[in-house]
Image: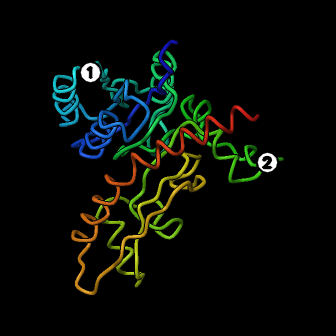
Amino acid sequence: MGELHRPTIAILASGSGTTAEAFIHATQDEIVDAEVGLVICDIESAPIFGVVARLNSQYNLDIQTRLINGKLFPKGRQERGQTLEESNEIARIVSFENISLIALMGYMRIVAEKGDLMSEYGWKPEYSVNEPESDGIFNVRMLNTHPGILPQTADTFGENTQKKVIELGLDHTNHTVHGVAAGVDSGPIYAEHKVPVFNNDTPGKLFKRVQRVEKAHLPIDIDKFLKEQAKFKAAA
């Protein structure tokens, strides 16, 4: 009997790669029944390139890395976020590498609303037509993580998200996993994990707590999503 095919994931990231590193460790610890085949970053000097090289050596992996940003692919500039050329190049490479799912992990570029990446992998409103919304999300092939409650903290990131949580007087924040859709942090929510807010919290303290929750839960959430998505597609 041949080996069962494991889904291949592409990670989009912008910075240190701590979440991506935790996720790759989880694939090697068999917490996630998938493998990371590609990491795309938009910042040339980002530490994540070194992180991937180290993990490739540690686990004898062959995770490919690519630098793709608006400077290298400038055509079709948008008011915010990716250029159309940048979006289309990511979609081209992801398709060439036969990626099953794209996961944004600390990716600081807004996905271009009209680019190929959104068109081919993101959420479309018609997905919920004639089918339960709980199933419709499994048409999505691109997920994002957000360190707050949605929609209250949409279009914020990092410590700024937690600053807003504290300013709103909320008793908890969230680690949220949602489908990527046109508009910032507007896609359907797949998973939420509450993180309590304490009286002496600062945005920095709260954000560190959310990051710990994210690293613990994201591998499990993505593994669950992939398994449920496979069942959804098999029944379609």
Q: Position of residue 159 (x, y in %)?
A: 28, 65
Q: Position of residue 11 (x, y in %)?
A: 38, 35
Circle 1 residue: 61
Please identify the quarter of the rendering in which residue 114 is found.
top right
Residue at left offset 35%, top offset 79%: 166
Q: Is residue 189 above or below residue 115?
A: below
Chosen colour scheme: rainbow
Picture coordinates of residue 133 (x, y %)?
71, 53
103 on left or right of 119:
left
As drawn, 86 above or below 30: above
| Marks 2,1: beta carbons within 8 A | no
- For marks 2 and 1 on the same chain, the one whose residue lies earlier in the sequence: 1
Q: Sort mark 1 into few (<14), some (14-19) or many (20+) by Cα contacts within 10 Å.
A: some
Position of 206 with respect to 187 (left or right) is left
Which of labels 2 and 1 is toward the front?
1
In the image, farthest residue toward the front: 1
What residue is pinned by disc 2? 131
Q: Position of residue 105 (x, y in %)?
A: 36, 44
